[in-house]
Image (tube, rainbow, N blue to C red):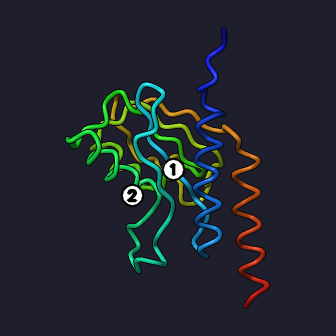
Amino acid sequence: MENPFDDVYFMKKALQEAEIAFDKGEIPVGALIVIDNRIIARAHNLTELLNDVTAHAEMQAITAAANFLGGKYLINCTLYVTLEPCQMCAGALYWSQISRIVYGARDPERGCIALHTKLHPKTVMVGGVLEEESAQLLKRFFIEKRNLN
């Protein structure tokens, strides 16, 4: 029997978080952290609400997961995020020693890949999971934002 808890399943959950951000007027990025097929953290961008440039979905998820686990390291955890992590988030993920990062859409200008940000040597990164859905949500957000101004 096939495992229903695959990368697509969890990325759909991260997209739900991105939709929540969208509805709040935040850049629609959603994230969750999973260990043993169990979601231990859900988050979305809160930079506008908190007036904090560091309140990215990944940063919120890292904090929530560390609190849940009672420690700062996220070994054996997977981050699912709808947009490739930026340099700041990738740096935090490096220090958390997260085992795996799965992202949806690429960020060719500000993403950690384009900026050559190092991840922890044991971290595996997989991209393009529900890439089109993730990218479309971001495009829709910025089109609506432009039309309001």
- Residue 130, image x and y in percent? 70, 41
Neighbour tally class for label 2: few under 14, some 14-19, many 20 plus, Cα within 10 Å: many
Q: Nearer the viewer, residue 114 or 65?
A: 65
Q: Quadrant of the N terminus?
A: top right
Q: Residue at x 64, y 34 (%)?
A: 9
Give the mark nearer the N terminus: 1 vs 2.
Answer: 1
Q: Vertically, is 103 above or below 100? A: below
Asked if the residue at tag 2 contacts the one at tag 1, i.e. Cβ–Cβ closer than 8 Å, the answer is yes
Identify which amino acid the numbered label 1 is placed on: Ala
Q: Residue at x 72, y 60 (%)?
A: 137
Q: Nearer the viewer, residue 65 or 75?
A: 65
Q: Vertically, is 43 above or below 124? A: below
- Residue 127, image x and y in percent? 61, 37
Q: Which mark is residue 60?
A: 2
SS at mark 1 in the image: strand
Q: Which mark is residue 31?
A: 1
Q: Vertically, is 141 above or below 93? A: below
- Residue 65, image x and y in percent? 34, 45
Q: Residue at x 65, y 43 (%)?
A: 12
Tell me: 103 left or right of 136. left
Neighbour tally class for label 1: few under 14, some 14-19, many 20 plus, Cα within 10 Å: many
SS at mark 2 in the image: helix
Identify which amino acid the numbered label 2 is placed on: Gln
Q: Residue at x 66, y 33 (%)?
A: 8
Tell me: 20 left or right of 86. right
Q: Residue furthest bottom?
A: 149
Q: How many marks?
A: 2
Q: Quadrant of the C terminus?
A: bottom right
Q: Which mark is residue 1?
A: none
CA separation, marks 1 and 2?
8 Å
- Residue 143, image x and y in percent? 77, 74
Tell me: 134 left or right of 38. right
